[in-house]
Image: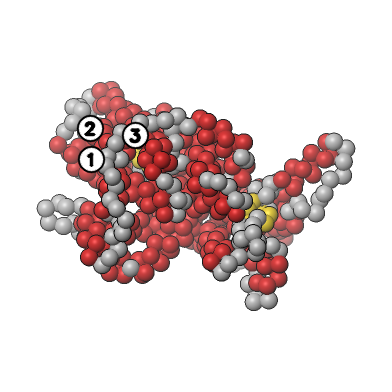
């Protein structure tokens, strides 16, 4: 099999457009949500993105060539690879934005840099989990029902991905609804434009034109010019991030997101096998993890993943070369400052319909890829993500209203005020902490109940009790402008016991642990106290 064939051109345009949308999203969120300046974005984040994509794209191209040589075939397609969209959104809104807001409330001199450090730690943690998961991925997948994994992703997709951009779509309807129409036609209507022009390209081009015509184009000056931004190791920033405690603060986000990446990549390797390309699991997953680790070490906060859609790229005729071309393209865009020009002339509104579509597809997959009888488990798994996004909106609204400042900090007095309106905000803030764990556990337990594996459901409740007691779920503390996870009460109490001290038990979230134990006892006893209904 040759390195480059005609089909690699078609595959390259599709994969490159996908990665370009991801990079434009990174640029927009980093600039306008996180407040990154050019020094951070162009000098550190984007070069780190380039390094991470070079690592994977080149390896998977070489892997395809090697498989072709070993099997004597000329139709082997490399695994598609790029930035993980769910992790991108999740780490921006669940890790870096809270870190920035907390830093601002504490009066930090450079909140954006602190947010960047938190993102680096999250990315590194995800990479370590992805690399380690290469050796245990099969066990994780067998132990966790598919509904639990997909429902958790769907909850994030519906809220932090879809609903935010849906608001923006109706805030700017001329651009938003027009581009959404193009995406719905091409991706859901299964039609294509004459001449083979990709629907995503049409949507972005039309959205860009409408954005400029309707005044949504940038008002500032265009970027000054291109330059050379070589990758710079970020080891010092990572060490500073560990000292600042970001790993423990956001571990309840990092661990589930890393596991999702492992399982998702594994499923995509299986998809490639179904299309006729049998790749070894361990090295494929390990290099995915190495790419994410390389991203963090060189300044990117965004994990990589093996993309879904290998059969589609293969059907286009793509082989190994499209992966190499994508690595060259990403390197050129990220290391020369070219993305600044593209991001300036292509407003985020022009591409938000594609991001909205991604969220819709992820949410729909939770129902399509699970047995029909597990639909209730999927719905239950959606609820924590929706609730967490609602709690996030409440806190943003309070800040807009003037709270969350040194003169008016957040405090427990808010709970009583909300309770008077029959809004039990204490429960919302408790649910928000570790909601990704909670979504998986509730959905998994519900699947077990549907299948009448009551003892397994009880074991999931035991996991919930342990996570609650140790603070990785539900435990939170007040800061000036936020509520954040608090894992210290239990560990301080445990440390006190080792020192021969009583310690304080009041702040330990024992109520949730006890509740889950009782819940598990109900499920466990069901095997002895209940019987199957007739006709079911």
Determine the image quadrant of residue 276: top left
Residue 320: image x %, image y %?
Answer: 25, 32
Q: Kindly report the distance in space between the C-alpha atoms of the residues bearing marks 2 and 1.
A: 8 Å
Q: Residue furthest left?
A: 195
Query: What residue do we see at 71% from left, 56% from top?
Result: 512
Which part of the image, by quadrant, shows the C terminus?
bottom right
* Image position of 428 with respect to 492: above or below: below
Residue that mark 3 sits on: 229
Q: Residues within 10 Å of mark 1 (few under 14, many from 20)?
A: many
* Image position of 491 with respect to 185: above or below: above
On the rendered structure, is 472 left or right of 268? right
Residue that mark 2 sits on: 321
Q: Depth-wise, is mark 1 or mark 3 nearer the camera?
A: 3
Query: What residue do we see at 82% from left, 49% from top?
Result: 504
Q: Helix or strand or loop: what does disc 1 sit on? A: helix
Along the viewing direction, whichever of 515 and 200 lies nearer the viewer: 200
Q: Helix or strand or loop: what does disc 3 sit on? A: loop
* Image position of 138 with respect to 400: above or below: above
On the rendered structure, is 493 left or right of 6? right
| Circle 2/circle 1 CB separation < 8 Å | yes
Q: Residues within 10 Å of mark 2 (few under 14, many from 20)?
A: many
Q: Kindly report the distance in space between the C-alpha atoms of the residues bearing marks 3 and 2.
A: 26 Å
Residue that mark 1 sits on: 12
Query: What residue do we see at 43% from left, 62% from top?
Result: 164
Query: What residue do we see at 64% from left, 66% from top?
Result: 425
């Amino acid at each position: 099999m040759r390195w480059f064939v005609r089909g690699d051109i078609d595959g390259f345009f599709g994969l490159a457009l996908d990665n370009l949308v991801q990079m434009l999203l990174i640029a927009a969120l980093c600039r306008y949500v996180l407040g990154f300046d050019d020094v951070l974005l162009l000098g550190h984040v984007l070069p780190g993105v380039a390094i991470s994509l070079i690592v994977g794209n080149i390896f998977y191209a070489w892997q395809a060539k090697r498989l072709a040589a070993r099997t004597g075939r000329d139709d082997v397609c490399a695994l598609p690879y790029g930035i993980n969209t769910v992790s991108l959104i999740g780490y921006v809104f669940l890790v870096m934005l809270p870190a920035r807001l907390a830093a601002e409330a504490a009066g930090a001199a450079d909140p954006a840099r602190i947010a960047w450090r938190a993102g680096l730690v999250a990315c590194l943690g995800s990479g370590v989990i992805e690399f380690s998961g290469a050796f245990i991925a099969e066990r994780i997948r067998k132990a966790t029902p598919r509904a639990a994994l997909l429902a958790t992703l769907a909850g994030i997709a519906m809220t932090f991905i879809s609903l935010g951009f849906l608001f923006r779509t109706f805030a700017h309807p001329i651009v938003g609804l027009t581009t959404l129409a193009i995406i719905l036609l091409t991706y859901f209507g299964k039609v294509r434009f004459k001449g083979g022009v990709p629907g995503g390209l049409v949507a972005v081009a039309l959205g860009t034109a409408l954005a400029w015509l309707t005044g949504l184009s940038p008002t500032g000056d265009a970027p000054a010019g291109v330059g050379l931004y070589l990758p710079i190791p970020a080891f010092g920033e990572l060490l500073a991030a560990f000292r600042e405690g970001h790993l423990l603060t956001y571990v309840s986000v990092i661990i589930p997101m890393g596991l999702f990446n492992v399982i998702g990549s594994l499923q995509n390797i299986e998809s490639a096998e179904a299309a006729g390309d049998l790749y070894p699991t361990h090295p494929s997953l390990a290099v995915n993890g190495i790419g994410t680790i390389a991203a963090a070490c060189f300044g990117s906060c965004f994990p990589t993943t093996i993309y879904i859609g290998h059969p589609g790229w293969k059907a286009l005729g793509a082989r190994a070369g499209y992966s190499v071309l994508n690595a060259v393209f990403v390197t050129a865009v990220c290391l020369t400052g070219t993305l600044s020009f593209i991001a300036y002339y292509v407003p985020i509104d022009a591409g938000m319909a594609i991001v909205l579509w991604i969220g819709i597809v992820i949410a729909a997959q939770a129902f399509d890829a699970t047995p029909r009888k597990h639909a209730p488990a999927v719905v239950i798994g959606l609820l924590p993500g929706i609730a967490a996004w609602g709690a996030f909106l409440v806190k943003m609204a309070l800040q807009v209203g003037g709270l969350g400042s040194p003169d008016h900090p957040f405090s427990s007095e808010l709970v009583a005020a909300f309770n008077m309106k029959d809004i039990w905000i204490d429960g919302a803030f408790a649910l928000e902490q570790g909601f990704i764990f909670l979504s998986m556990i509730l959905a998994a337990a519900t699947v077990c109940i549907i299948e009448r594996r009551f003892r397994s459901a009880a074991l999931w409740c035991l996991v919930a009790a342990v996570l609650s007691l140790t603070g990785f779920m539900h435990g939170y503390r007040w800061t000036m402008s936020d509520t954040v996870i608090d894992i210290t009460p239990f560990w301080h109490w445990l440390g006190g016991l080792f020192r021969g001290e009583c310690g304080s038990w009041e702040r330990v979230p024992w109520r949730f642990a006890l509740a889950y134990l009782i819940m598990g006892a109900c499920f466990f006893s069901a095997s002895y106290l209940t019987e199957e209904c007739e006709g079911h």
